[in-house]
Image (cartoon, grey):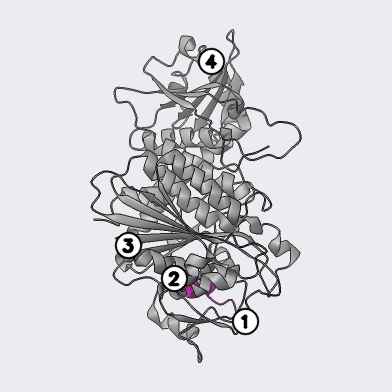
């Protein structure tokens, strides 16, 4: 029976400077090598060079360079997979290539894997090596199962990196993998296992394990905080376990702080505006924004980031029932802004409104929120790229650059003030949304902007890449956990705090 938190599965990272020859590869169950263009000179550097030369002659015709996979003619019959990196190298293409080769060679089934890069110069060599390790870890990570038969123990135990004079630093890869795995695990859990009440308890355990401070704001506390937008969404729940969780990471001597905010709708029926069966089928995943937020917190904690972080998670269901909130209701958010409800299935921006308002009260330097918020963002970008929005125009370039470097690509949308005209209400301060779906991803961001202190830099990530059939980049599962690598890269770059 799967736990609410992922099991410990530590894959050790080792290093080796020995030459890539027949003696070295015989020590491993499998070998993963990425090369530059497959010239005959380059292939001679591989152990059992004649084998690879013959395979290349057979398969590399008409300029095609398919990857090569073979069992070596040594005593342990070591599996060896050879991939040929295309130039120019990018993080996304390298992650995608590594995932495909690992899947084709079934490398996650082997215990001890050697990784090497030849014929590729730095800094591209570092990109390809990082992608290979990240993809191996993602492929081997266990995911929740509720079958009567106990799940198999993951095979992968160690990854050995063959390197030159300088040992590569893979600490960020390991930390973001841990965060991504946590996000995917939580999001995969079925809604009768992970509801807002049990989610809060799992987060308490996670906080204890990682030395975070844990605070839970139940419905009574949120009523005192006048968080009427959140409470409207939670009204129809069959339990009173909804609320906000605040996790706090405090490194020594931190003079700055940031806030991570996540939408945690543990199941979304659509409310009074009930979803169709197809639209509701994957709505246990509507809490992935919160999972990405806490996954990012875990990554930053493991990296011992010297900045204080508060992680605010809005946990509830959006149920159908006699008490469900309705179109045309007017509710008041925690910052005093009144909202005219238009559609009960726009609940994500409601719970985020109060969460952003409460996070703003503590005056962090930056607020970064994550949410599976709008279908229109998927319509604009597909599931390959996620949308970002910010109240700081100067951050646009650094946000998109972080997407390129991390391999979790993002696109920055406009945040011009005239979009607010579409959200004007005759009876309240702002409309929740409009009656049509025109630019709803932009209007949702403009709505959320009303609940963030203008003196605080804010980034909103609309997770259009949260689920992609067949996976995305190095992630082999439909649920991607997208955002942990991107957010960690952007925060570590210093663009937000400089």
Instruction: State how far apart marks 1 and 2 are (Cα).
Output: 23 Å
In x, y percent, where is residue 312?
44, 58
Q: Which residue is mark 1?
A: 327
Q: Is residue 290 above or below residue 82?
A: below
Q: Which sits in the foreground, 289 or 137?
A: 289
Q: Quadrant of the C terminus?
A: bottom left
Count neighbours of disc 2 (C-alpha within 10 A) and say few if under 14, some if 14 to 19, many if 20 or more.
some
In x, y percent, where is residue 85?
47, 36
Q: Which residue is mark 2?
A: 225
Q: Which residue is mark 3?
A: 395
Say which quarter of the image contains residue 211.
top left
Callout in the foreground (4, 2)? 2
Q: Is residue 393 left or right of residue 49?
A: left
User: Is residue 329 visible to the viewer in this orientation of the structure?
Assistant: yes
Q: Which mark is residue 50?
A: 4
Q: Which residues are magenta?
A: 437-444
Labels 4 and 3: the sequence-earlier one: 4
Residue in the image at 57% along x and 47% along y? 186
Labels 1 and 3: the sequence-earlier one: 1
Callout in the foreground (1, 2)? 2
């Amino acid at each position: 029976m799967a736990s609410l938190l992922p099991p410990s599965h530590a894959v050790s990272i080792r290093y080796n400077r020995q030459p890539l020859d027949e003696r070295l590869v015989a020590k491993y169950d499998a070998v993963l090598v990425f090369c530059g263009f497959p010239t005959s000179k380059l292939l001679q550097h591989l152990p059992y060079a004649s084998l690879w030369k013959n395979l290349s002659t057979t398969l590399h015709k008409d300029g095609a360079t398919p990857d090569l996979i073979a069992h070596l003619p040594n005593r342990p019959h070591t599996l060896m997979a050879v991939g040929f990196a295309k130039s120019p190298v990018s993080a996304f293409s390298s992650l995608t290539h590594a995932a495909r080769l690992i899947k084709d060679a079934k490398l996650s089934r082997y215990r001890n894997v050697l990784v090497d890069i030849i014929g590729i110069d730095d800094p591209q060599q570092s990109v390809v090596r990082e992608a290979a390790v990240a993809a191996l870890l993602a492929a081997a990570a266990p995911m929740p199962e509720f079958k009567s038969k106990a799940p198999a123990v993951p095979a992968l135990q160690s990854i050995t990196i063959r390197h030159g004079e300088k040992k590569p630093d893979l600490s960020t890869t390991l930390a973001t993998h841990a965060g991504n795995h946590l996000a995917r695990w939580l999001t995969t859990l079925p809604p009768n296992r992970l509801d807002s009440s049990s989610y809060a308890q799992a987060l308490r355990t996670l906080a204890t394990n990682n030395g975070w401070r844990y605070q839970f704001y139940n419905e009574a506390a949120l009523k005192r905080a006048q968080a009427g937008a959140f409470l409207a969404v939670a009204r129809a729940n069959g339990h009173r376990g909804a609320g906000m969780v605040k996790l706090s990471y405090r490194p020594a001597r931190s003079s700055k702080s940031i806030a991570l905010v996540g939408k945690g709708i543990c199941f979304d029926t659509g409310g009074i505006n009930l979803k169709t069966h197809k639209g509701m089928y994957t709505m246990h995943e509507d809490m992935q924004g919160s999972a990405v937020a806490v996954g990012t917190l875990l990554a930053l904690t493991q990296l011992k980031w010297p900045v204080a972080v508060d992680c605010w998670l809005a946990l509830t269901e959006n149920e159908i029932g006699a008490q469900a909130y309705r179109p045309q209701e007017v509710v008041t958010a925690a910052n005093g802004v009144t909202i005219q409800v238009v559609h009960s299935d726009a609940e994500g921006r409601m719970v985020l409104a109060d969460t952003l308002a409460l996070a703003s009260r503590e005056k962090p330097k930056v607020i970064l929120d994550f949410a599976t918020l709008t279908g229109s963002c998927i319509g604009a970008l597909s599931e390959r790229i996620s949308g970002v929005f910010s109240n700081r125009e100067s951050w646009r370039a650094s946000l998109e650059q972080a997407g390129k470097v991390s391999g979790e690509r993002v696109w920055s949308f406009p945040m011009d003030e005239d979009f607010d005209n579409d959200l004007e209400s005759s009876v309240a301060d702002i409309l929740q949304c409009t009656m049509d779906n025109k630019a709803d991803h932009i209007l949702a961001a403009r709505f959320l902007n009303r609940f963030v202190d203008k003196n605080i830099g804010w980034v909103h990530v609309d997770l259009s890449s949260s689920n992609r059939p067949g996976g995305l980049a190095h992630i082999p599962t439909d649920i991607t956990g997208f955002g942990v690598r991107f957010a960690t890269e952007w925060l570590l770059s210093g663009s937000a705090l400089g």
